[in-house]
Image: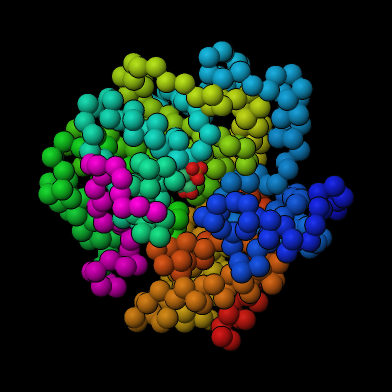
């Protein structure tokens, strides 16, 4: 629990602050819950609201406070950097940027030897697509249904959720193949992973053959679809999809914004579960424990193709890089892939126990400390149940447990805490989630 308190961080009641948000920000800045939580402090997996209530943060600001709120190593390094040099732009050389580039290249799958820094996952996706288009001299991009890529015009066109698109797709040349979504595949419950993968790969080939010129620039795939509801691809899908896109002369882009840096357990990046070395990889979220940092890494010759000028005012900012370097150092020291694997196993077993108790938990899925429950009306119809999902979110909130929602219909519960979460903190989260399920069951 958080023991310190900063009085200057409590400027009003939660209701006053929420009112101010509603009248000053764009309406699309939409927090969770009918009565949003107004947070003012954090430490490890705990956060405190402006009224002094503690919550166990089991979603980590969308899988982003990867080593816990206000980690002292990050705070210390950022403070030191802030006192020396706060900003330069990419027009000047600073060492922290190169230190982080090397850290990332050392962790990334083989062959990804060049890095570029930006400020959000959206921008990193934009950079990846631009790099693929420049390198191949082509424009068409293949994405997957249920994808989420960010909030720019291009990213919302790649995103395949009607609810996250303010406009019809505004970018030409983006097509979508089927997501390797085992639970909702039309092959029946007895289909093997091999059969499912063959089905989804056939669809990918057919999509390229029928909806592009046959000369795509790239395929972009999340190693586990995050906003889509932690959809774990069927075994072998990523590797075969990479082969397919390369066969057509395009590049394989792995979006590791949610799955990167040990989150999925055992490996540093999600695509490594399928033994894939992408041509381009996109990272953000957990990379800097909450600082606005993203990176795009690419093979040497892909990066070399981009000859025109480009600048990022804040990309590689020394303070952001200090946060990133400190976060990555802690991740390596603490061996977060192993921690995610171990704690993820503890969590997964508990979620599967809940699935046995509650008929409305259709599927439990995920990897490492990225685990989800798909909420359905019943297991035969598999009809998404967004109302029960909202009720469960609210019940968890009442248990002072923060979890996330996702899925096409907002019917998937997502969990992804700090990878430094302890065994007893995980057990505490499970106890709260169990009570929340019991309450949601009574509805
Ligand atoms: C897989 C994936 N890619 C890209 C993005 C966009 O990142 P950002 O919100 O930092 O722009 C997200 C955000 O949730 C994401 O989940």
- Residue drawn where x is 46% and y is 69% of the image: 411
The residues colored magenta run: 166-190
- Residue drawn where x is 46% and y is 66% of the image: 410
Residue 235, can we see it? no
- Check the image and name the residue furthest to the front: 23
Q: Is residue 290 magenta?
A: no
Q: Nearer the viewer, residue 303 or 239?
A: 303
- Check the image and name the residue furthest to the bottom: 442
Q: Nearer the viewer, residue 53 or 199?
A: 53
- Check the image and name the residue furthest to the top: 92
In the picture, residue 124 is in which quadrant?
top left
10 over 117 or under it: above or below: below
The C terminus is located in which quarter?
bottom right
- Residue drawn where x is 56% and y is 27% of the image: 314
Q: Is residue 172 magenta?
A: yes
In the picture, residue 57 is in which quadrant?
bottom right
Q: Position of residue 360 (x, y in %)?
A: 47, 79
Dominant SS type (magenta): loop
- Residue drawn where x is 46% and y is 25% of the image: 115
Colouring scheme, one of rainbow, by chain, secondary structure, one colour: rainbow
Compared across the picture, whether 277 is left or right of 70 comes to: left
Compared across the picture, whether 57 is left or right of 40 comes to: left
Compared across the picture, whether 43 is left or right of 189 comes to: right
138 over 232 or under it: above or below: above
Residue 316, can we see it? yes
Q: Position of residue 265 (x, y in %)?
A: 52, 49
The N terminus is located in which quarter?
bottom right
């Amino acid at each position: 629990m958080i023991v310190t308190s900063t009085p200057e961080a409590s400027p009003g009641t939660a209701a006053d602050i929420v009112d101010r948000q509603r009248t000053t920000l764009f309406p699309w800045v939409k927090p969770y819950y009918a009565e949003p939580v107004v947070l003012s402090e954090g430490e490890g997996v705990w956060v405190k609201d402006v009224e002094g209530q503690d919550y166990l943060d089991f979603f980590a600001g969308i899988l982003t406070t990867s080593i816990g709120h206000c980690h002292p190593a990050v705070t210390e390094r950022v403070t030191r950097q802030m006192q020396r040099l706060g900003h330069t732009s990419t027009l000047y050389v600073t060492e922290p940027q190169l230190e982080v580039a090397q850290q990332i290249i050392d962790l990334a799958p083989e062959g990804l030897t060049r890095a570029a820094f930006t400020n959000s996952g959206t921008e990193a996706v934009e950079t990846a697509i631009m790099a693929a288009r420049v390198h191949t001299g082509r424009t068409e991009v293949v994405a997957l249904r249920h994808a989420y890529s960010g909030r720019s015009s291009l990213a919302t066109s790649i995103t395949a959720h009607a609810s996250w698109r303010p406009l019809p797709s505004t970018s030409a040349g983006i097509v979508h193949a089927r997501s390797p979504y085992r639970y909702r595949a039309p092959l029946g419950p007895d289909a093997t992973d091999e059969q499912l993968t063959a089905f989804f790969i056939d669809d990918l080939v057919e999509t390229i053959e029928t909806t592009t010129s046959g000369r795509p620039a790239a395929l972009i795939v999340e190693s586990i679809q995050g906003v889509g509801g932690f959809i774990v691809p069927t075994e072998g899908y990523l590797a075969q999809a990479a082969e397919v896109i390369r066969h057509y002369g395009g590049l394989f882009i792995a979006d590791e914004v949610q799955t990167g840096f040990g989150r999925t357990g055992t490996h540093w990046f999600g695509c490594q579960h399928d033994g894939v070395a992408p041509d381009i990889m996109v990272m953000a979220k957990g990379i800097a424990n909450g600082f606005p940092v993203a990176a795009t890494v690419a093979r040497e010759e892909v990066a070399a193709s981009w000859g025109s000028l480009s600048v990022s005012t804040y990309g590689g900012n020394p303070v952001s890089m200090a946060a990133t370097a400190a976060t990555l150092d802690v991740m390596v020291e603490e061996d977060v892939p192993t921690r995610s694997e171990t704690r993820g196993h503890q969590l997964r077993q508990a979620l599967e126990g809940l699935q046995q108790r509650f008929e409305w938990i259709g599927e439990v899925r995920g990897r490492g400390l990225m685990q989800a429950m798909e909420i359905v009306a019943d297991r035969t119809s598999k009809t998404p149940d967004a109302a029960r999902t909202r009720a469960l979110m609210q019940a968890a909130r009442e248990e002072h447990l923060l979890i996330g929602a996702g899925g096409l219909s907002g019917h998937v519960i997502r969990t992804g805490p700090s990878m430094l979460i302890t065994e007893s903190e995980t057990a505490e989260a499970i106890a709260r989630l169990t009570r929340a399920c019991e309450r949601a069951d009574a509805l």
